[in-house]
């Protein structure tokens, strides 16, 4: 894996991870077009570092906004904690049930079945992209026709549970954008746009370490605990994390601007177009 490949994947990951267009779909397509193996241990290690870079981009970008939105006083902190806990519980429940169902039913005949074995299936990615594209498009267009909720309105437990449940679907399905699904669900549930964005990415920071740990465990298991062969990839992966961090900051500024200006639905249009492109690649034999 060359440094150029690493930088390309880092920029793709940083932009697509934090825009509502599915980083996993873009990274997998980019890997296939560059002749890389998405399931290779060194590629998985790189993705772990790229996710780490984008997570720090989220923390740097949102820290002050989170303090204003969720930590002004004791009541704000309490309401935020309740909403976060409920969303995480629903995410773990829905994501866990769906993942377990896939591994125990669809992949029951495969040894050491992991849902990740389906992650490079372009036909499944295209379907997930189309689904989240419709969701984003619907949320963006409907919210333009309705009276917006007060910007400072507190999120209800029911709204948090809906957001968490839909987020759970992004765990096993590559192409189903986590940020696109959660922000769109929040908007459709009556949450103010900026609060929806703040809460969505707060959830991301809570869940990303668990996702990184799962991917890291896959690397260890694939190498049977011996990381020596992967050591040459560590330095390039660190460079990747840096580029993913910088690209992530740029993506977040872009997302916030389009969300505020009422152009959210264009991300849905993009997902639908990209779904067609991925379906074409699948039909072409990738």
Image: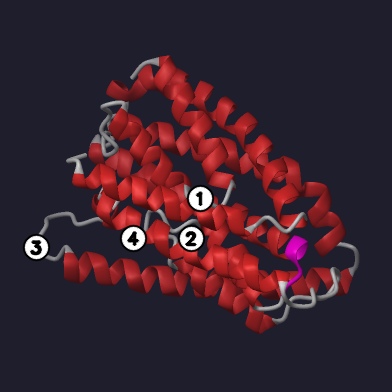
User: Residue 168: percent from the left, percent from the top?
Assistant: 46, 67
- The furthest residue to the bottom: 158
In the rendering, which numbered label is found on residue 133? 2
Rounded to the nearest angstrom, the CA distance separating label 2 from label 4 is 10 Å
* Mark 3 lies on residue: 109
- Whether the residues at callouts 4 and 3 have beta carbons within 8 Å, the answer is no
Magenta segment boundaries in residue numbering: 191-195
What residue did someone put label 4 on? Answer: 127
Say if the magenta span includes residue 193: yes
Relative to 161, is 46 on the left or the right? Answer: left
Q: Count neighbours of disc 3 (C-alpha within 10 A) and say few if under 14, some if 14 to 19, many if 20 or more.
A: few
* Residue 278, visible in the rendered structure: yes
**Circle 3 sits in a helix, a strand or a loop, which is it?**
loop
The x and y percentages for residue 267 are 57, 53
- Residue at image point 25% right, 50% down: 121
Q: Secondary structure at mark 2?
A: helix
Work out how far the residue at label 2 is from the one at label 1, CA to CA, in angstroms. 7 Å
Residue 130 falls within the magenta-colored stretch: no
**Circle 4: is it few (<14), some (14-19), or many (20+) Cα within 10 Å?**
many
Residue in front for this viewpoint, 34 or 104: 34
| Disc 4 to disc 1, C-alpha distance | 14 Å
Judging from the image, what secondary structure is the residue with disc 4 in? Answer: helix
Dot 1 lies on which element? helix
- How packed mark 1 is, by other alpha carbons closer than 10 Å (few <14, some 14-19, many 20 or more), is some
Please tell me which of labels 2 and 4 falls first in the chain.
Answer: 4
* Residue 173 in the image, given as x and y percentages of width and height: 37, 59
Which corner quadrant of the image does residue 81 belong to?
bottom right
Disc marking residue 270 = 1
């Amino acid at each position: 894996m060359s440094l150029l490949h690493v930088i390309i994947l880092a920029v793709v990951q940083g932009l697509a991870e934090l825009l509502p267009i599915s980083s996993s779909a873009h990274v997998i397509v980019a890997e296939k077009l560059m002749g890389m193996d998405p399931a290779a241990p060194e590629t998985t290690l790189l993705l772990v570092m790229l996710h780490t870079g984008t997570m720090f981009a989220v923390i740097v970008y949102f820290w002050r906004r989170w303090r204003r939105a969720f930590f002004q006083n004791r009541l704000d902190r309490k309401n935020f904690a309740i909403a976060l806990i409920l969303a995480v519980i629903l995410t773990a429940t829905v994501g866990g049930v769906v993942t377990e169902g896939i591994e125990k039913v669809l992949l029951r005949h495969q040894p050491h079945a992991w849902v990740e074995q389906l992650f490079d299936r372009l036909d499944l990615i295209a379907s997930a992209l189309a689904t989240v594209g419709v969701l984003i498009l619907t949320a963006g267009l409907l919210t333009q026709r309705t009276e917006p909720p007060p910007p400072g309105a507190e999120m209800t437990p029911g709204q948090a549970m809906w957001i968490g449940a839909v987020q759970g679907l992004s765990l096993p399905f590559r192409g189903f954008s986590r940020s696109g699904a959660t922000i769109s669900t929040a908007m459709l549930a009556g949450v103010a746009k900026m609060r929806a964005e703040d809460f969505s990415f707060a959830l991301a920071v809570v869940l990303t370490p668990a996702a990184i740990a799962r991917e890291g465990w896959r690397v260890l298991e694939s190498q049977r605990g011996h990381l020596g062969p992967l050591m040459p990839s560590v330095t390039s992966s660190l460079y990747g994390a840096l580029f993913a961090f910088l690209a992530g900051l740029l993506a977040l500024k872009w997302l916030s601007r389009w969300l505020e200006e009422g152009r959210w639905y264009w991300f849905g249009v993009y997902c639908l177009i990209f779904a067609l492109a991925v379906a074409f690649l699948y039909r072409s034999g990738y």
